[in-house]
Image (cartoon, rainbow, N blue to C red):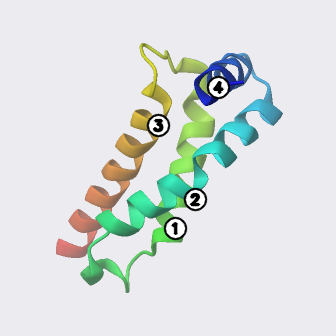
């Protein structure tokens, strides 16, 4: 089964409230998202937040919002996760400046 088909089925389940499907989605994207965050997180934020913190917060926000997520194209879930992570990094940068 192609990854896209697997992800599509898991997305339908997760949006419908299936926690196991959501967990599988997170596992499917975990490594890529972890690497993405590690590349994007500026070193000067280290004392304030780690890449593991951002990863965890991203998954918490995604879990809370999955019921409202609407996949409009292949790759939409990954794009949504990276947008959440980017916003969390921006929030950490703003907090550091204050």
Badge 4 element: loop
Mark nearer the viewer, 4 or 1: 4
Distance Cα–Cα, label 3 vs label 1 = 18 Å
Distance Cα–Cα, label 4 vs label 1 = 31 Å
Distance Cα–Cα, label 2 vs label 3 = 15 Å
Taking the spot 49% from the left edge, 53% from the top edge, the residue there is: 33
Badge 3 element: helix
Distance Cα–Cα, label 4 vs label 3 = 16 Å
Mark with earlier residue (2, 3) = 2
Taking the spot 45% from the left edge, 63% from the top edge, the residue there is: 35
Few, some or many C-alpha atoms within 10 Å of disc 3 (few <14, some 14-19, many ≥20)?
some
Looking at the rendering, which quadrant does residue 39 occupy?
Answer: bottom left
Q: Are marks 1 and 2 in contact (CB under 8 Å)?
A: yes
Distance Cα–Cα, label 1 vs label 2 = 5 Å
Badge 2 element: helix
Taking the spot 54% from the left edge, 19% from the top edge, the residue there is: 68
Few, some or many C-alpha atoms within 10 Å of disc 2 (few <14, some 14-19, many ≥20)?
some
Disc number at residue 69? Answer: none
**Residue at mark 1:** 53
Disc number at residue 56? Answer: 2
């Amino acid at each position: 089964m192609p990854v896209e088909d697997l992800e599509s089925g898991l997305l339908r389940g997760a949006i419908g409230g299936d926690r196991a499907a959501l967990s599988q989605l997170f596992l499917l994207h975990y490594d890529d998202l972890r690497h993405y965050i590690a590349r994007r997180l500026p070193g000067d934020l280290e004392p304030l937040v780690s890449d593991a913190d951002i990863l965890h917060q991203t998954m918490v926000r995604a879990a809370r919002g999955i019921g409202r997520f609407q996949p409009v194209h292949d790759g939409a879930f990954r794009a949504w996760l990276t947008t959440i992570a980017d916003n969390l990094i921006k929030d950490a940068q703003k907090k550091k400046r204050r």
